[in-house]
Image (cartoon, rainbow, N blue to C red):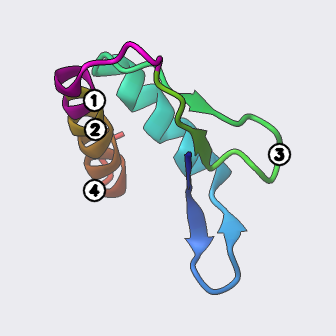
């Protein structure tokens, strides 16, 4: 699964810098996430949790990712 961050929803223009900031903020909050670092694809998060992940860990990861998005979209990162 993945999440693609774009600057323009109609044109699907990748938002490389925003993806990098969200990834860095998530790491600061305790979630290591894999964001593609290829030019033009830097706004794509690959989501591949381990098979042994618990429901609690999934909820915590989503909470952290949600906070990272909120922080960066509001200009806090």
> Is 73 left or right of 14, judged from the image as shown?
left
8 sits left or right of 57 in the view: right
> Is residue 10 shown above or below 42?
below
Q: Earlier in the sequence, mark 4 or mark 2?
A: 2
Quadrant assignment for the N terminus: top right
Mark 1–mark 2 distance (CA, rounded to whole Å) = 6 Å
Question: What is the residue that sits farthest to the right in this orientation?
Answer: 39
Q: Quadrant of residue 28?
A: top left
Q: Earlier in the sequence, mark 3 or mark 1?
A: 3
Marks 3 and 1 sit apart, C-alpha to C-alpha, by 29 Å
Q: Are marks 4 and 2 in contact (CB under 8 Å)?
A: no
Which segment is the magenta one? 50-59
Q: CA distance from mark 4 to mark 3?
A: 24 Å
For residue 62, the mark is 2
Identify the mark at residue 36; answer none if there is no mark.
none
Of circles 4 and 1, which is in front? 1
Q: Position of residue 27 (x, y in %)?
A: 40, 20
Q: Earlier in the sequence, mark 4 or mark 1?
A: 1
Secondary element at tag 3: loop
Q: CA distance from mark 4 to mark 1?
A: 24 Å
**Residue designated by label 1:** 58
Q: Quadrant of residue 6?
A: bottom right
Per the image, is 16 magenta?
A: no
What kind of element bears circle 1? helix
Element marked by disc 2: helix
- On residue 74, the disc is 4
Give the residue at mark 3.
Answer: 39
């Amino acid at each position: 699964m993945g999440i693609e961050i774009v600057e323009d929803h109609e044109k699907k223009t990748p938002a490389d810098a925003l993806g990098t900031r969200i990834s860095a903020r998530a790491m600061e909050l305790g979630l290591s996430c894999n964001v593609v670092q290829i030019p033009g694809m830097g706004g794509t998060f690959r989501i591949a949790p381990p098979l042994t992940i618990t429901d609690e860990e999934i909820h915590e990861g989503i909470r952290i990712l949600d906070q990272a998005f909120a922080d960066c979209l509001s200009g806090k990162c």
